[in-house]
Image (cartoon, grey):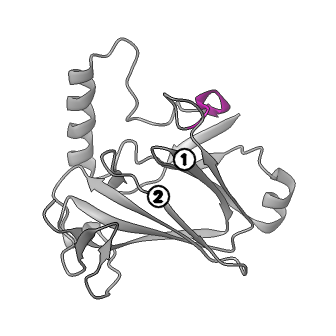
Amino acid sequence: MNRVIPLQVPWMVAPSMPSLKLYSEEYGSTRVELFAFFGFVPENRDVSPVFAPSYDTDGVALDSKNLSGRYQLICLDFEKVGWVRRSPQHSDSDVVDESRFDWSCVKGRPEPNEQPADWHTRVMQDWSITRISPDPSVYIVENSDWNNEESKRFGLTHYLILGEYCYIEILAGAMEWSSKGSLNGW
């Protein structure tokens, strides 16, 4: 079964402003931009910068020199991209058909009978101690059934990125993330 493994990053796709943007080139480079939330006040060691002048995106001003904001514009850059697919949300309540995946490795999901306040406390404590998001909404899919033969032949990894109204799947050879800066006023 498709088992999702959370990407080991200090941020999560910001639930209040997910805004996934997909840029893909014919020759295999693909970028996904998203607004991310840090569960702690990040330090420069937590973030890989992309040095560029400040600019606006979706009407939000960025400070490209400030990498300590809790809301940042994150770039996921993929290389050796074989396939990309963007799909609309699965239903009114779920962005992806969760029955397609094994979620057992995602520590940030509520445990059976866990109260919302207890879940929130557990997740935020773990996040601030480890500095790794327990559920970033960006995953590596192990045992993927998507283009399995071609993926193995070209050494591609299946990535899954969840937004609010869509999700993106990418088969790529490598991925790196960086910050374009903090959102001013957030």
Q: Residue at x 66, y 78 (%)?
A: 25
Q: Tag 2: residue type?
A: Leu
Looking at the image, the residue that sits furthest to the front is 59
Residue 96 rendering spot, x and y as whole percentages: 58, 37
33 on left or right of 4? left
Give percent across and percent down for residue 124.
Answer: 22, 39
Q: Where residue 20 appears, x then y in whole percent?
A: 47, 58
State the residue at coordinates (26%, 21%).
Answer: 116
Span colored in magenta: 96-101
Which residue carries the number 1 mark?
166
Check disc 2 and report its element: helix, strand or loop: loop
Using a 10 Å C-alpha cutoff, classify the residue at mark 2 as few (fewer than 14 neighbours), some (14 to 19) or many (20 or more): some
Q: Earlier in the sequence, mark 2 or mark 1?
A: 2
Residue 62 occupies quadrant: bottom left
Tell whether label 1 touches label 2 (CB within 8 Å). yes
Decide whether residue 4 is among the magenta residues.
Answer: no
Compared to residue 54, the image places residue 159 above or below, namely: above
Query: Residue 20: which numbered mark, if any?
Result: 2
146 sits to left or right of 113? right
The local secondary structure at tag 1 comes to strand
Which image quarter: residue 144? top right
Q: How far is the residue under mark 2 from the one under mark 1?
A: 8 Å
